Image: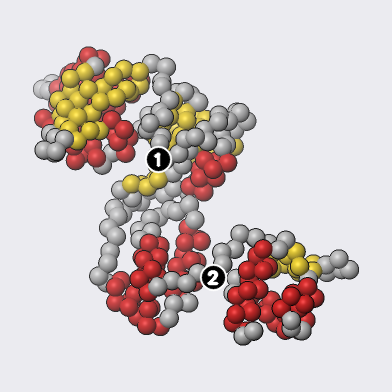
């Protein structure tokens, strides 16, 4: 068996086994123990995390058994993988920041020279435009782990009103317009909320018993929204310009409906506590929005206008 083929098969073998000895591999591959030791050294240099245990019952084991087998890529597939990772460069924070950089460097280094040359030429002709953000989201990994493992977190969350502590159970994280967001169940509001990850200042595990949210994920979170204790129904008409503004806001997504002519409307339940926020948001849209209800929201908008008139009125 050629050495290159033996190394590939050995990588698959040690990934499959819990533990193994040099003699076992020597018998399995029909080579000497010295050859196996050299092969294991090469696998270790290639990044296979092997750990040697000494003693009469010693041997080798793989520290991380979740190794991927070698995958053959076509030239276009290789370029697609490279640019998919390359597109993450503008983000100041990533859930797998160090790993993404390592994968990109390792993948590029092992590409054939002609494929690398072609990718180098494509770099100046392919760009993924993402808004540059100064905001940092250092807790992405913890939020993602909590979503996967069904854990409750105690976070310190900062808004314009100040910092507050909140218990949340994340269901995932996503990025939009250069910012990271975390949809999570809020134990304070008893409903699903979307949190800006860069506004999460501190994170620690909470003692609260988690809910069973395994059925919820980013794909169906809007269909399975928990109902707030005190909600009212929002009905808003939008011009095409208003639709564009609302499309850029992730928290509007479940309520936004768009017609073929580009106009649209917002319809759905909102928490009564959020009325001041919605009033300020719709005032930004001016005549590109017409709020038809609820009456409480119209009252909040009038209150905002009264306060603005007083702020800018003559003394």
Q: Residue at x 27, y 72 (%)?
A: 124
Visible residue check, residue 285? no
The x, y position of residue 59, in whole percent, is 79, 69
Q: Which residue is mark 1?
A: 219
Q: Residue at x 40, y 83 (%)?
A: 113
Q: Secondary structure at mark 2?
A: loop
Disc sitting over residue 70 in the figure: 2
Q: Which residue is most to the right?
A: 56
The x, y position of residue 217, in whole percent, is 45, 39
Q: Residue at x 40, y 62 (%)?
A: 85
Disc sitting over residue 138 in the figure: none
Of the image marks 2 and 1, the number of the one nearer the N terminus: 2
- Quadrant of residue 278 within the rendered picture: top left
Alpha carbons under labels 2 and 1: distance apart: 31 Å
The x, y position of residue 10, in whole percent, is 66, 73
Left or right? Give the position of 233 relative to 17.
Answer: left
CA neighbours of label 1 inside 10 A, class few (<14), some (14 to 19), many (20+): few
- Quadrant of residue 20 within the rendered picture: bottom right
Left or right? Give the position of 3 relative to 303.
Answer: right
Which one is nearer the viewer's eye here, 138 or 105? Answer: 105
């Amino acid at each position: 068996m050629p050495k290159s083929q033996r190394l590939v098969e050995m990588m698959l073998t040690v990934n499959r086994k819990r533990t193994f000895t040099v003699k076992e591999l020597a018998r399995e591959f029909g080579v000497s123990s010295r050859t196996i030791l050299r092969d294991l050294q090469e696998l270790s240099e290639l990044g296979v995390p092997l750990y040697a245990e000494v003693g009469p019952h010693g041997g080798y084991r793989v520290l991380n058994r979740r190794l991927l087998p070698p995958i053959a890529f076509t030239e276009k597939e290789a370029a697609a993988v490279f640019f998919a990772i390359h597109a993450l460069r503008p983000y100041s924070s990533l859930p797998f920041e160090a790993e993404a950089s390592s994968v990109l460097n390792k993948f590029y280094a092992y590409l054939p020279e002609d494929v690398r040359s072609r990718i180098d030429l494509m770099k100046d002709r392919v760009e993924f435009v993402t808004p540059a953000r100064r905001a940092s989201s250092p807790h992405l990994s913890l939020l993602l782990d909590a979503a996967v493992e069904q854990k409750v977190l105690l976070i310190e969350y900062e808004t314009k009103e100040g910092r507050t502590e909140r218990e949340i159970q994340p269901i995932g994280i996503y990025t939009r317009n250069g910012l990271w967001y975390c949809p999570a169940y809020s134990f304070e509001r008893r409903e699903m909320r979307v949190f800006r990850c860069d506004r999460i200042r501190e994170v620690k595990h909470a003692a609260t018993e988690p809910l069973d949210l395994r059925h919820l994920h980013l794909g169906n979170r809007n269909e399975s929204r928990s109902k707030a204790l005190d909600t009212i129904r929002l009905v808003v008409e939008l011009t095409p310009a208003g639709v564009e503004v609302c499309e850029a806001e992730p928290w509007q997504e479940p309520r936004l409906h768009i017609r073929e002519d580009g106009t649209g409307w917002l319809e759905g339940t909102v928490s009564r506590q959020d009325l001041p926020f919605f009033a300020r948001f719709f005032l930004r849209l001016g005549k590109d929005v017409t709020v038809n209800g609820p009456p409480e929201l119209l009252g909040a908008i009038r209150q905002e206008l009264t306060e603005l008139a007083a702020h800018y009125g003559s003394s």
